[in-house]
Image (cartoon, rainbow, N blue to C red):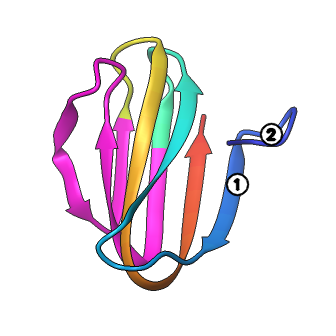
Amino acid sequence: LFDPGKTSTQISNSIKFPEVIRYLVLAKAGQTLDVSVQGATLSVLGSDGKPFPDATGRSNWRALLPTNGDYIIEVNAKSPFILNVEVK
């Protein structure tokens, strides 16, 4: 998801409702994942593939990650959207 050497990105995209687009983020335990979206809602799935209960149908979410692994950000949009993702 990130350019080499970067820890954040902004993505502008559009999809047709009710499609969902997924973005994969590799992160480590103890890092903070900060996600926000304009023009859509998002959900974040943990490295175990299960959604975080407090990260479903939101426009923003921030949390300290519990484990190493791939985290999935799902975006559900009816119009063009802007997604901001940062890992620190």
Q: Residue at x 55, y 78 (%)?
A: 14
Q: Where residue 86 sits in the image (x, y, percent)? A: 60, 47
Q: Residue at x 21, y 29 (%)?
A: 50
Q: Residues within 10 Å of mark 1 (few under 14, many from 20)?
A: some
Q: How many marks?
A: 2
**Which residue is outermost to the bottom?**
79
Q: Is residue 68 left or right of residue 82?
A: left
Q: Residue at x 66, y 65 (%)?
A: 11
Q: Are marks 2 and 1 in contact (CB under 8 Å)?
A: yes
Amino acid on which disc 2 is placed: Lys
Task: Point out the stretch of residues depicted in magenta.
Answer: 34-63
**Which residue is outermost to the right?**
4
Please name the predominant secondary structure of the magenta segment in the image: strand
Residue 36 in the magenta stretch? The answer is yes
Residue labelled with disc 2: 6
| Residue 9 tag number | 1
Q: Is residue 70 left or right of residue 13?
A: left
Q: Residues within 10 Å of mark 2 (few under 14, many from 20)?
A: few
Seen in the picture, residue 26 relative to 63 is either above or below; the reply is above
